[in-house]
Image: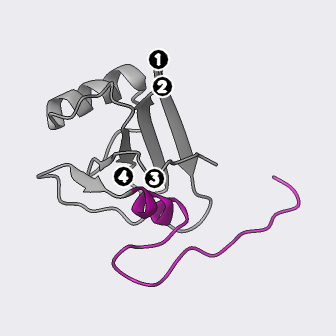
Amino acid sequence: MLSIADSTSVFLIPGVTDMRKGIERLSTVVASMTTENIFSGAYFLFCSRNRKTVKILYWDRNGFCLWQKKLDKEKFWWPKDVEDVKNLEPYELRWILDGLDPTSIHGHQTLNYSSIF
C-alpha cells in the first residue's frame, strides 16, 4: 500500500488519462494543467477511461515515482469534469483507493482469491 502522510498535497487530474503514458508524459500533463510545483512531493492522480486503473505520480527526493492500482472488479469514483485540477485531502485519496465514493457511503467489495487462474 502507498504511504500517504497527512501533510502530503494531493491533486486529482479529472477526466480520462491514457494509461500507456509513463512518467515523462504524465509529468507533461501535470505541467500543462496546473501551476503546482511538480517537484514538491505532491501526489498527482490520473484515472483510466474504464475507471479501473489509477496512477499516482510524485517526486521523491531524486526522481519521479509512478504508483499504480488496477481493480479486478468495481470502478474508482472519478469526476468527469476536466475544467480544473482538484485539490484533495490525503484522507480523500485513501477513501478513493479504498473504493469509497466521497459523494456516497458505498465502497468496493473485498475480494479474496486463492489462485490467479
**From the viewer's perspective, is the residue at label 4 or at label 3 nearer?**
3
**From the viewer's perspective, is the residue at label 2 or at label 3 nearer?**
3
Q: Name the outermost residue toward the right.
A: 114
Observer able to see residue 60: yes
- What secondary structure is marked by label 4? loop
Q: Residues within 10 Å of mark 3 (few under 14, many from 20)?
A: few
Magenta span has 93?
Answer: yes
Disc ID at residue 6: 3
Disc ID at residue 49: 4
Instruction: Measure the C-alpha gap from mark 1 to mark 4.
Output: 27 Å
As shown in the figure, which amino acid type bears the numbered disc 2? Asp
Q: Is residue 35 left or right of residue 116?
A: left
- What secondary structure is marked by label 2? loop
- Label 2: which residue? 60
As shown in the figure, which amino acid type bears the numbered disc 4? Arg
Q: Residues within 10 Å of mark 4 (few under 14, many from 20)?
A: some
Instruction: Measure the C-alpha gap from mark 4 to mark 3.
Output: 29 Å
**From the viewer's perspective, is the residue at label 4 or at label 2 nearer?**
2
- What secondary structure is marked by label 3? loop
Q: Residue at x 45, y 42 (%)?
A: 55
**From the viewer's perspective, is the residue at label 1 or at label 3 nearer?**
3
Q: Main secondary structure of the magenta part?
A: loop
- Label 1: which residue? 63
**Vertical side of 12 occupied by 23: above or below:** above
Instruction: Measure the C-alpha gap from mark 1 to mark 3.
Output: 21 Å
Q: Quadrant of residue 105?
A: bottom left
Residues in magenta?
A: 90-117
Mark 1 touches mark 3? (CB < 8 Å): no
First in residue order: circle 4 vs circle 3: 3
